[in-house]
Image: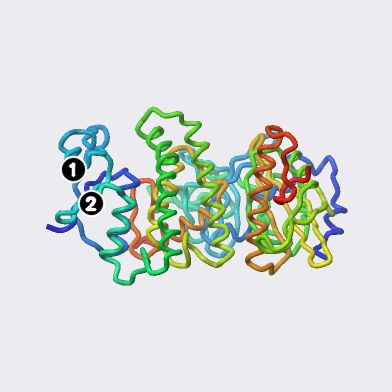
Amino acid sequence: MGLQLYDYILSGSAYKARLLMALLGVDYQPVAIDFHPGGEHKKPDFLAINPAGTLPVLVDGDLTLCDSQAILAYLAQKFDPTDTWFPTRDPGVTGRILQWLAFAGRLTDTAGAARLHDMLGRPLNIEKARTNAHMVLRELEAHLTEQGFRGDNFLTGSNPTIADIACFPYTALSPDGGIDHDDYPAIRKWLVAIRRLPGFIEMPGIHRLHDMRDEADA
Amino acid sequence: MYGLLKLMNAGLTENDQGSDGWVPVVLSADLPVAGVMRAQIDATQPLDLVVWRSRSGQVSAFDNRCPHRGMRLSFGFVRGERLSCIYHGWQYGEDGACRHIPAHPDMTPPASIGANTYLCREYDGVIWISQNADNPPDLPTFGGQGLRSLSVNRDEADLRKLLAETCIPLSGAGETAPAEASIIAENQTSLVLESTTEAASLQLMIHFQKVTPGKTMLHIQTNPDLPVDLRISLSRWAERFRWSAENMGTMVNSWDASAGEMRP
C-alpha cells in the first residue's frame, strides 16, 4: 500500500500536499472526501481517521498525518533526495522555514476563512476576516519586497522550500474571498515564480501560466 | 540633478488636477512581460482598469471589463501581443480592438467590438495612465530606481503633509539615526524628499495614485544603485510611515522620533 491522501478538490490545504507531491514526482492514491455539501469530514468514519475533522490527511503505512504543514515536512524529508525543499542542516534556515509554516496557518485562518464564507456560505464576520487577511498579506508583501532586494525569488532564499508551498494556496486563492492582490506587487511576482516551477499543477482558482501550457500560443 | 527643476516648474494648475492628468499606477519593474494587473483610480468618474504588458514589452490599459460578458479583464492572461479574457477567451490587441473570438475561429471580429482604452506611458521607471488624449504628459524626470509601491489607507493630501515631517534612514539597519527630510520639489503627481547630512545624501521620489476615497498608493523611487541594506531600511521606513499615517488621530503625541517615524 503506497501513500493515501484524503483529499477535497477545492481545499487549498489538500492542494499543498498535492502540489508538493507533483513537484517531487511522488505517486499517491487520492481518497475523495465529500467536504461540501456532504460534510463527510465531520462524520464518524472520517473522525476515526482524523479526530480534528480537517483535510488533508496523509496515510503512509502505519503513519497518519493530519496537519498540512506536517505533511509537507514529512514528504520533503522522505522524498526529496536533493534536500532543498526542507533543508535542516542550518538551524537558521530551518527556523525560518518553520516560522513560515506557522504563518501559513494565519493565512488559512484569515484569507482561507473569507474564501469559505464567500464560496460555501460559512458564517463569519467577513469584514474582520478580510481586514485581518490584508494585515497578513502586508507582512508577506514586506518580506517578499526585501527578498527581491536580495535577489531572492522565494520566502527563504533563491530556491523554493515547503515554506513557499505552505503559503502559496491561500495567498493565491484570496481573491475568491474578496481579498484582491492589487496592493501587492511583490506577492504577484512570487505567485508567478511558484506557478513557473517545473511540475506545477493547478487547482480550481489557481491556473497554470499560459506559457507553461502545452497548447501555448497558437 | 534628477530633473528637479522641471518638477518644480510643473507647478500646480487647475487643469492638471483631477482625472485629466497623468496618474502613476505601477513601477515598471513590478509589471513584468506578460504581467496583468488591476489598477483603480479615484477620479470624478472612478476608474477600474486592467494594465498589461505584452510579450514585446508594450504596456496598455483598458477598462477592466470584457465587452463580451463583463468579466474583469485583469483575471485574463497575455498571449503574445494580445490580452485574453479568462472567461471565453476573447482576445484584444494593444489598441483595444477584438482580434479573436475562439468560439468563431474563422470570423474576423467586427471593428465595433473593442475594449475601452486609455493612454499609457512608461516613463522613467513608472507606468502612467491618462484619460485625456489632448493632454501631453508633463512628467517628472528623476532617473531613479524603483523601491516599492505601498498602499496606505489615508488621503493623498494627508500623506503629503505627513511626508513633510518625516525622518528617513540614510544607512542600513540601525547604523545611524534617521535624518530629517524635507520636500525639495512637489507637483500635482509627485514630490521629492531629500535628506542630507555631512556623511550622506538621499532622495526619494514619491508618486501618488488616488485609488479609492481614503486610500492612496505611493510609488516610491530612490537614487540609483543604493546598497541592499539601505533599500531594506527604506522599505521598513515606508512601513513605519504607513503605520503612522494610518494611526494618526487615534494616538496623541506619541510619535517616537528616535524610532524614525514622525517628529513630535
| Picture coordinates of residue A55, whole percent (x, y) | 27, 43
Task: Locate residue A151 relative to residue A198 in the image: left or right.
Answer: right
Element type where label 1 sits in the image:
loop
Residue drawn at x 21%, y 60% as measured from the top left: A27
Q: Is B68 located above or below residue B121 in the figure? A: above
For residue B224, say whether it is visible.
yes
Residue drawn at point x = 44 percent, y = 39 percent? A110
Q: Is residue A208 above or below residue A158?
A: above
- Residue A29 placement (x, y as % from top left): 18, 54
Whether residue A218 is visible to the viewer of this picture, yes or no, is: no
Quadrant of the image containing the N terminus of chain A: bottom left
Identity of the residue furthest to the bottom in this view: A82
Count neighbours of disc 2 (C-alpha within 10 A) and say few if under 14, some if 14 to 19, many if 20 or more.
many
| Mark 1 or 2, nearer chain start | 1
From the image, tell me which residue sits under label 1.
A49
* Number of the label disc, if any, that sits on residue B13: none
Residue A21: image location, x then y, percent? 28, 59
Q: Is residue B104 left or right of residue B216?
A: left
Chain letter for mark 2: A
